[in-house]
Image: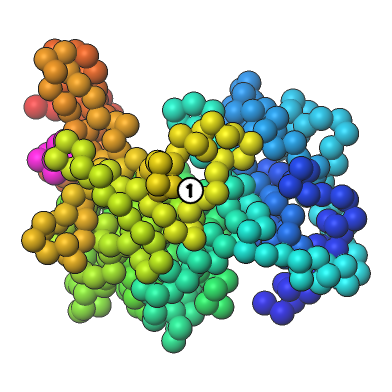
Amino acid sequence: YAETLQRVRRIGAALLRRNLSSDRPIAILSGNDLEHAQLGLAANYVGIPYAPISPAYSLISSDFGKLRHIFNLLTPGLVFACDARYARAIQAVVPPDVEIIVGPDFATLDAAPDAADVAHARVTPDTIAKILFTSGSTGMPKGVINTQRMWCSNQAMVASALQFFRDEPPVIVDWAPWHHTAGGNHDVGLVLQNGGTMYIDEGKPLPGAIEATVRNLREIAPTWYFTVPKGYEALLPFFRADAALRENFFSRLKVLWFAGAGLAQHVFDEWKELAHRTCGEDILFLTGLGSTETAPYAFGRMWDTGNAANVGLPPPGLAVKLVPHDGKYEARLKGPNIMPGYWREPKLTADAFDQEGYYKLGDALRFDDPARPELGLLFEGRLAEDFKLATGTWVSVGPLRAAFIAHFAPCVRDVVVAGTDRDFVAAIIFPDLDAFRRLVPYLPKDASSADIVAHE
């Protein structure tokens, strides 16, 4: 930590020489790596906004449409890319007068640190720390302004609940991307806040990439573990088959944590059973709910429960207004961790808040037990997902998706519900082929996915 601080001060001083500001922020084209971390910390230290941008917009996109939109919105004064894989994207979208630093040239960001300390003294709670872009799944990505106040207050909220970090700094093995609020704000933040250790996991919850995560978890025993629901599903076959992996993973684990989507109940139950069978005691399997606009922690379940859909309660310092909506509640939020707005998008900013200044989260909730609100709230899906059939019947997609997966457990990995303005509901099913093989063990080992799905 001391060595990193000295390096951060020197990088920050070099950044100040480039006349960077909120009008000319830093754009980072990189996954999770040490240079990315140092550059982000240096920008925070001296009060220069930066934007970590999803590598997919550079490495997978063919037309660079979303990347071009982001750069037009940002007008960056400096672009950092971790290696030459980003060359084609840089040539397509970066104006010729913008400085570009790639890979090995990162070492040139070095200057005497005195100027950085002067700039650091001028950083306030309302200084912009970073600009995080939403996924753009329903349009072009929106730039969410994240201030120092948002990040720091949100970490205080986390610390109020996960108090064991005070006695035992967290050790985490984490793949969550830093261009996303869960990885870049929540996970990196809780490590920094509590003097912990982060091992950067190069694996992903995808076929062909989850194996790297498994190798890392055989080597490092975390004390707090986070992944998305698909990550827990992808890891299950390895944990079922490998006792040594289970024993190392659970050896000092205090908390399992999932977020980002609903976790299928049978997956939730199996992980709790695996933990108890391995170490002879229950491991808390917790979760929360939030968004890029909330930095992200807005609700958290910090107690054991049998219901995977229970997302808990808001933390101290966050006001929540529950607006009735078709038998559920729409959540609206106000507090120091809520964004001031979208970057250079005043109309979108105005639409995101109600007349009382509450941010409209867009998620549907209901009480686990209306007579005992302290037992927490259940996540009922995104309000924008719900639709009407031609008959006028509302389809509540979140609960229907969860019920569908539970009914066919463990055969269905995920389901897409469709039918807007049609006469009936339709479903696209993503089967769990590993579950099918367990159900029908005599299937040929070389059976194709089509053969398995078609098997009577």
Q: Is residue 160 left or right of residue 47?
A: left
Quarter occupied by the C terminus? top left
* Residue 403 belongs to the span the image colors magenta: yes
Q: Is residue 16 left or right of residue 155?
A: right
Which of 7 and 233 lies nearest the eye of the viewer? Answer: 7
For numbered disc 1, what is the local secondary structure?
helix
User: Could you say where residue 80 lies in the image, as x and y percent from the top left?
Assistant: 75, 46
* Residue 81 belongs to the span the image colors magenta: no
Type of the residue with mark 1 = Glu
User: Could you say where residue 371 lies in the image, as x and y percent from the top left?
Assistant: 8, 61
Farthest-out residue, front:
355
Q: Is residue 86 left or right of residue 137?
A: right
Residue depicted at x 85% and y 41%: 99
Residue depicted at x 20% and y 42%: 324
Query: From the viewer's perspective, is residue 426 above or below residue 189?
Result: above
Quarter holding residue 243: bottom left
Residue that numbered label 1 is attached to: 293
User: Could you say where residue 259 lies in the image, as x and y percent from the top left?
Assistant: 36, 53
Which of 371 and 139 lies nearest the eye of the viewer? Answer: 371
Q: Residues within 10 Å of mark 1 (few under 14, many from 20)?
A: many
- The residue range painted magenta reads 399-409
Does the image show residue 223?
no
Quarter occupied by the N terminus? bottom right
Residue depicted at x 78% and y 28%: 91
What kind of secondary structure does the magenta stretch mostly adopt? helix
Query: From the viewer's perspective, is residue 70 above or below residue 268?
Result: above
Residue depicted at x 25% and y 30%: 386
Does the image show residue 61?
yes
